[in-house]
Amino acid sequence: MRVASSVRLNAADGRLLISDAGNHRLRAVTPGRQILTLAGTGNPAFSGDSALSRDG
């Protein structure tokens, strides 16, 4: 991670959510210390499909 601009704890599952602005990604660190990429490609660009981010 290069620039962690925001960090939050998800109390429901114990994951630490990190906005990795330097790498243009949203990361999660699990209680088992695994780092996951939840969103982002690493490129500073929009690549969405114009759909909602989640059903609801």
Image (cartoon, grey):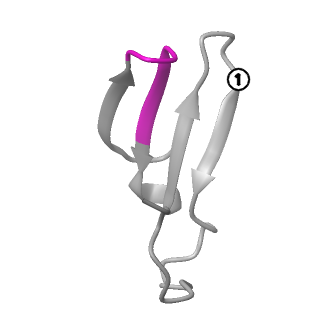
Residue at 56%, 88% in the rendered image: 49
Residue 32, quarter of the rendered image: top right
| Tag 1: amino acid | Gln
* Residue 53 in the image, given as x and y percentages of width and height: 47, 67
Is 46 on the left-hand or right-hand side of 8?
right
* Residue 40 in the image, given as x and y percentages of width and height: 57, 64
Q: State the SS at label 1.
A: loop
* Residue 54 in the image, given as x and y percentages of width and height: 48, 62
* Residue 47 in the image, given as x and y percentages of width and height: 56, 85
Residue 49, relative to residue 12: is it above or below? below
Mark 1 crowdedness (10 Å alpha carbons): few <14, some 14-19, many ≥20: few
Is residue 2 one of those drawn in magenta?
no
Residue 23, relative to residue 52: is it above or below? above
Q: Which residues are magenta?
A: 11-18
Label 1, on which residue? 34
Quick one: quadrant of the C terminus? bottom left
Is 10 on the left-hand or right-hand side of 27?
left
Front residue of 7/9: it is 9
Front residue of 55/47: it is 55
Total numbered badges shown on the rendered structure: 1
Residue at 48%, 47% in the rendered image: 2
Residue 8, quarter of the rendered image: top left
Is residue 17 one of those drawn in magenta?
yes
Residue at 48%, 85% in the rendered image: 46
Q: Residue furthest front?
A: 56
Residue at 40%, 56% in the rendered image: 21
